[in-house]
């Protein structure tokens, strides 16, 4: 199974008597683009939190590049190459946009690639240019607009130099052209060989972006395959639209 | 300025102040300045955990008292001189800071603040019941009759030590602020989960921050038993240490090493002046009024206000 980048096997997460995830299996290959969809409360964010280490799963195994990372704290997983953006942006508000990127560059990226301390600012600028925030590099991160906040979230995840980037609803509530902005940004990561899990409700984006789509409903994975066949799946239609 | 250059300048200024003070004949100056410097150290130390890392410690008095009582215990046990008790008290308080750091694993915000206050209460009770260091009666620590370095009185030596300690605390605080470690602390203060997700080992950084903060507070306390030659638990654990070490960074500004320095010199001096001109009971009232004023008018302290003014002028 060494060709798998991420391998989630039988992951179960309970909150008291409520089972948020029930034996979920999920794999991501290197450089793959996976769309993860499901109605609200289906366990998508819980799954992300388990993969990243913000929550601990009670059962199941999470392997990254063949290594069991289930017991590792979040910062170790980030250093190994799992980065995420947050659904509700969490910028470091006391810092400038540029300084926001310094943190993952200093603490995560430097763990696996040589980066001299005086090159950190240049590298941060390079990433900011990629996401289109270069002109706001020295602005306070707390004053950004919603779409810029989302871009900063992604930029900060990218600055950790991950092998797998998990984008948690980076497009919710954005306009059509803003969605295209973010989509272009995520697509560019593919060229750099970064695998992406995109959690999204914007179906247009999911269909356009994904190599493969997985569907979570009430903590179980009910479908996993190429995008066209997944949206035609009767169980998926039932979960989203109800029975006819 | 590099850390080394800053340290050189800071210690040079400290030595110059200590030497120049020999020209001052007024003995009250030394006892007042000693107290102000003590607050410079406490405020700077508090700010490492409170301002840089965002964990409000209400137990500053406990760390201060740990330093003071380490001196007392070692003095009673071995007649240990200051040169031994200063590093010892700093180390013991650092260990207590390490313990406080582990509390951050489970406690945030107001819960952490309450736990740190509880730590002070527990230690107070412990010292009150520890007969070896005098318990509730207090302990006498006589100033040696011979004063080294040709200084006239022992308070001059204590003042000189305190100036050097304050310089050391400022050098450490500034070095942290401009380092990768300091950036990590700021990330923790802004959002702990986001910091962890960006690869910051939050627990490790918080523990180091709490340890350094506690150690410096303890260091400030080590000379205190000699200051009055007498120490008892309720003065060593006085609430005014806890309140002042929070109020001073808040008034000066919590984002940089200069804030606690300015806050402590300002508030500390005002308190000393009020104490001799009006009454000592007014001290905490003044702190309270100033706090209310600053929180409403300049929530980022004097440094924050200056920075905002500078930005307005530039744009």
Image (cartoon, coloured by chain):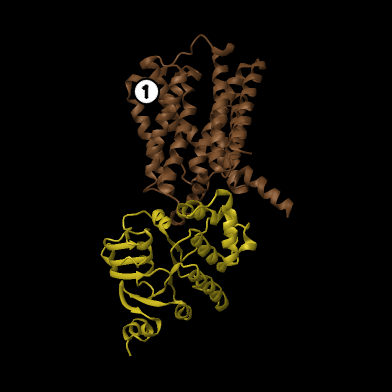
Q: Is residue A40 left or right of residue A115?
A: left
Q: Is residue B40 left or right of residue A86?
A: right
Residue A242: x and y, percent? 34, 85
Q: Is residue B275 above or below residue B311?
A: above
**Residue sticking out furthest to the top:** B145
> Which colour represents chain A?
yellow
Give A78 or B163, whichever is nearer the viewer: A78
Q: Quadrant of the N terminus of chain A?
A: bottom left
At 49% across and 43% down in the image, what residue appears?
B50
Give B279 or A218, whichever is nearer the viewer: A218
Q: Is residue A140 above or below residue B141?
A: below
Residue A17, quarter of the rendered image: bottom left
At 52% across and 48% down in the image, what residue appears?
B183
Q: Quadrant of the C terminus of chain A?
A: bottom left
Q: Is residue A15 above or below residue B313?
A: below
Chain bearing mark 1: B
- Element marked by disc 1: helix
Figure disc tally: 1
**Residue sticking out furthest to the bottom:** A244
Residue A144: x and y, percent? 59, 63
**Is residue A178 something one can see in this rendering?**
yes
Residue B257: x and y, percent? 58, 39
- Disc 1 crowd rating (10 Å Cα; few below 14, some 14-19, many 20+) is some
> Which colour represents chain B?
brown
**Is residue B232 something one can see in this rendering?**
no
Residue B148: x and y, percent? 54, 12
Identify the residue under disc 1: B136
């Amino acid at each position: 199974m060494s060709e798998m980048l991420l391998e989630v096997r039988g992951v179960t997460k309970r909150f008291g008597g409520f089972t948020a995830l029930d034996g979920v299996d999920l794999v991501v290959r290197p450089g793959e683009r996976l769309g993860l969809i499901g109605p609200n409360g289906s366990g998508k964010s819980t799954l992300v939190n388990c993969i990243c280490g913000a929550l601990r799963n009670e059962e199941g195994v999470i392997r990254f590049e063949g290594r069991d990372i289930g017991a590792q704290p979040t910062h170790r997983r980030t250093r190994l190459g799992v980065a995420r953006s947050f659904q509700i942006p969490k910028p470091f508000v006391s810092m400038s946009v540029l300084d926001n990127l310094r943190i993952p560059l200093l603490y995560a990226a430097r763990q696996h690639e040589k980066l001299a301390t005086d090159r950190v600012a240049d590298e941060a600028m390079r990433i900011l240019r990629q996401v289109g925030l270069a002109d706001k590099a020295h602005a306070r991160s707390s004053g950004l607009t919603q779409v810029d906040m989302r871009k900063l979230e992604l930029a900060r995840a990218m600055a950790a130099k991950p092998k797998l980037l998990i984008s948690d609803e980076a497009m919710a509530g954005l306009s059509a052209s803003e969605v295209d902005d973010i989509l272009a940004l995520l697509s560019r990561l593919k060229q750099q060989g970064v695998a992406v899990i995109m959690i999204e409700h914007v179906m247009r984006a999911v269909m356009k972006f994904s190599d493969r789509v997985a569907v979570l409903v009430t903590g179980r994975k009910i479908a996993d395959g190429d995008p066209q066949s997944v949206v035609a799946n009767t169980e998926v239609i039932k979960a989203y639209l109800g029975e006819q | 300025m590099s850390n080394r250059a800053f340290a050189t300048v800071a210690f040079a200024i400290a030595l110059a102040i200590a030497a120049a003070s020999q020209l001052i004949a007024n003995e009250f100056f030394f006892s007042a300045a000693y107290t102000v410097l003590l607050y410079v150290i406490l405020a700077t130390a508090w700010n490492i955990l409170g301002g840089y890392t965002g964990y409000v410690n209400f137990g500053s008095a406990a760390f201060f008292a740990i330093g003071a009582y380490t001196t007392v215990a070692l003095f009673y046990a071995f007649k240990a001189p200051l040169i031994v008790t200063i590093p010892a008290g700093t180390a013991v308080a650092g260990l207590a800071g390490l313990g406080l750091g582990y509390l951050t694993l489970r406690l945030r915000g107001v819960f952490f603040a309450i736990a740190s206050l509880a730590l002070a209460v527990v230690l107070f009770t412990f010292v009150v019941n520890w007969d070896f260091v005098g318990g509730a009666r207090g302990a006498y620590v006589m100033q040696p009759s011979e004063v080294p370095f040709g200084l006239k009185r022992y308070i001059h030596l204590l003042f000189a030590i305190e100036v050097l300690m304050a310089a050391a605390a400022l050098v450490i605080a500034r070095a942290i602020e401009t380092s990768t470690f300091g950036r990590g602390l700021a990330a923790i203060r802004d959002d702990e989960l986001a910091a962890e997700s960006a690869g910051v080992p939050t627990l490790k950084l918080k523990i180091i921050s709490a340890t350094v903060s506690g150690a410096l507070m303890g260091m400030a306390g080590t000379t205190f038993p000699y200051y009055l030659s007498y120490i008892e638990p309720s003065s060593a654990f006085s609430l005014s240490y806890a309140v002042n070490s929070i109020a001073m960074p808040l008034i000066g500004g919590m984002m940089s090493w200069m804030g606690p320095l300015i806050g402590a010199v300002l508030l500390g001096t005002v308190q000393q002046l009020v104490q001799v001109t009006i009454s000592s009971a007014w001290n905490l009232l003044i702190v309270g009024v100033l706090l209310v004023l600053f929180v409403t008018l300049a929530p980022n302290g004097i440094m924050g206000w200056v920075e905002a003014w500078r930005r307005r002028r530039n744009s």
